[in-house]
Image (tube, rainbow, N blue to C red):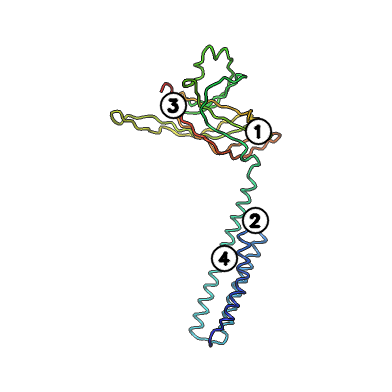
Amino acid sequence: MSLDWGLILGVVGVLGIPVGAGIGIAVADPFTKGELQFVRGCFAAAAIITLLSFLLLTYEIPVGLGKTIGAGVVGALTLMGLVIALDWTKQRFESSKSDATSQQKRSALDGTIKFECLQEAFRLPADGKLLELIASDDTARTVGLQSHWVSEHAYNSNPGIIPTRHGWIDKCRITNFGTSPVFNVSINVEAIFSEHIPIAEKTVEQKEIDRKTIRFSVDQVDAGQGNSVDILIWNTTRFLTHLSFANDVKLQRLGSVERENVKLIPAQRMVALFPPKT
């Protein structure tokens, strides 16, 4: 018996309908549970069509070793293809569900908060309130946030209370580009403490001594670029200290007790703090 190529092409065309429909629905987002069942049905139908097509095409061929081997090969390949298709469908569903969950967890405030590190000439705030992030304690090696008020008279009498470098100081600035204030804004900072170890004449090696992650929090950041909160940064240890701040913050909205994770506007969030008198 010669194979009917017209019949074969017809079978391929029919087979492509459930396979194409299943793949088309599976790759779309979102991929729901009901669509999952439908896609599984499409692939199962494609497997059944494949087996029936083989029987139809070989109906007039006498049963023998060749037909038996052919039937076994087609059956095994069909079953293997069905298992792979169903497993891919399950993975696609789990991935879509994970993406949907991630989407739901995104905050409406993403991209409205900017946290940046910069160096500016020091100016005493009009209200005299200072926020300071200080690397301290040669033994414990920690970074802590503190706040206090300094009057203009006190500062002018003793400018050394703010350790600037020729009038310049490192700082972090938090700016809220949203429409309402945010509260208890906390961010992680990784602090790396290192020192220079002499290894030869006029040659030193920078060696990491300690590394730790610390979280600190700012009570409130009002909306508007003119209401940015500045945090002065300096180092009182004998170590070179690198600070690297996270890409997101946790905060509370106005009128809410729930804390949410907010992605920050991209900015420079690393700073190197030299030991005093270097």
Residue 30's label in the rendered image is 2
Residue picked out by circle 1: 182
Hey, what amino acid is under mark 1? Val
Residue 85's label in the rendered image is 4
Of residues 276 and 143, the one nearer the viewer is 276
Q: Residue at (37%, 29%) from the top-left corner?
A: 196
Q: Of the residues under marks 4 and 3, which one precedes in the sequence?
A: 4
Disc 2 packing (10 Å; few <14; some 14–19; many ≥20): some
Q: Of the residues under marks 2 and 4, which one precedes in the sequence?
A: 2
Q: Residue at (59%, 62%) from the top-left corner?
A: 89
Name which quarter of the figure residue 90 lies in.
bottom right
Disc 4 packing (10 Å; few <14; some 14–19; many ≥20): some
Hey, what amino acid is under mark 2? Pro
The label nearer to you, 4 versus 3, is: 3
Element type where label 4 sits in the image: helix
Residue 274's label in the rendered image is 3
Q: Of the residues under marks 3 and 1, which one precedes in the sequence?
A: 1
Hey, what amino acid is under mark 3? Phe
Element type where label 1 sits in the image: strand
In space, the residues marked 3 and 1 are separated at their CA atoms by 32 Å
